[in-house]
Image (cartoon, rainbow, N blue to C red):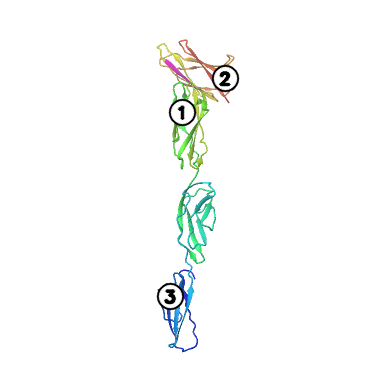
Amino acid sequence: LCEGNSTQLVALAGGGSVNYSYWWTSNPPGFTSNDTNPIAYPSVTTTYYVELSDGPETLTDSVLVTVWPLPAAAGSISGPEEVCIGSEKVLYKIDPVPGATAYFWELSEGMVGGSTSNSIEINFPVFIENTSLTVTAANDCGIGQPSTLEINTIPIPDMPGIPTGQDSLCTTTDTIIQYQITEPVPWASLYEWELLPEEAGTIEGDGMSAEVHWVKNWTGQTFVRVRAVNDCGLSNWSEALEVYVFSCLGIDDPDGNRIPILVYPNPANRMLNVECWMLNEYQDIELVISDLFGRKVIETSHPGRGVVELNISDIQAGTYILSLHAGNGLKVTQRVVIQH
């Protein structure tokens, strides 16, 4: 019988005097009875002895009752407590349980696997919060105490938002610029930053911000992007921040100062900005854009202070020369690339 059940002891007698008396004992000791057919509750395998007497004569007999115990409690489950989403055949197991002939594994919804042995391989195809794994040992008599392991599932980080920072600059003066993302990415342990094209400079940092060390006098269109990283993998690259890099032109004024002239973006598409901040009051600056054969495609003036925006959407793509003529006779030129 199974542990916890009872058995009725029966001694059948015949002949002699009808005035029978019974005396029941056991090994291991602990059970006694003078009932004819007593009920016993053995917790372990036990031999029961009976003495039957009709007065003049006493006879003895015995019966062995085998007790099958319930399985012992399941031990601690061994296996990783943090698992990446998408992991397959992750092994968990317990030591064999005495008395067990089978094992029942209970998985949280979303986990995939099955086994009746003391080990199991589990797939984690989706992100699950508050996951757990439970195992119970069993035999024909019942089940033992279960064991449970809490498991944290970790997803690959989401794509970060577009970086923020200075999106137009002059590499003559702006040699180091910081870029950052405004919101941390859940589950990210660090970040990878990228500057394209690579020859524009180097980008340093593995946190939510990074510094670009620009190559002096490099000009063109660049892109800054970032992705999130953890032990489970890499997110997609973020949408790139377009950064227009140009050279700072300058016109020397009579006082020995240098008037900064900024031309951006370069390459340009539909609009071109020409920025100038004169330190003294000068007359308007003549502004001309010519093709490589010297033919003027735009001719206008600049007030000498502020930004003039030029519509270049009707100009054919190609390389042009932008010229600025100051009132004191000084002139400066800049190559401009137009791309549509």
Secondary element at image label 2 = strand
Report crowding for label 2: few under 14, some 14 to 19, many 20 or more residues within 10 A (C-alpha): some
The picture places residue 309, in percent across and down from the top left corner, at 50, 22
- Mark 2 → mark 1, Cα distance in angstroms: 28 Å
- Select label 2 or label 1 by which is in front: 1
The residue that label 1 is drawn on is 212
Q: Amino acid at mark 3?
A: Ser
Q: Secondary structure at mark 1?
A: strand
Residue 167 screen position, x and y as percent:
47, 28
The front one of 83 and 120 is 120
Mark 1 Cα shell of 10 Å, populated few (<14), some (14-19), many (≥20): many
Q: Which residues are magenta?
A: 258-263
* Residue at disc 3, secondary structure: strand
Q: Quadrant of the C terminus?
A: top right
Disc ID at residue 319: 2
Mark before the other along the chain sequence, 3 or 1: 3
The stretch drawn in magenta includes residue 227: no
Residue 193 higher or lower than 303, as above or below = below
Residue type, mark 1 in image? Val
Q: Marks 3 and 1, Cα distance to the nearest angstrom?
A: 88 Å
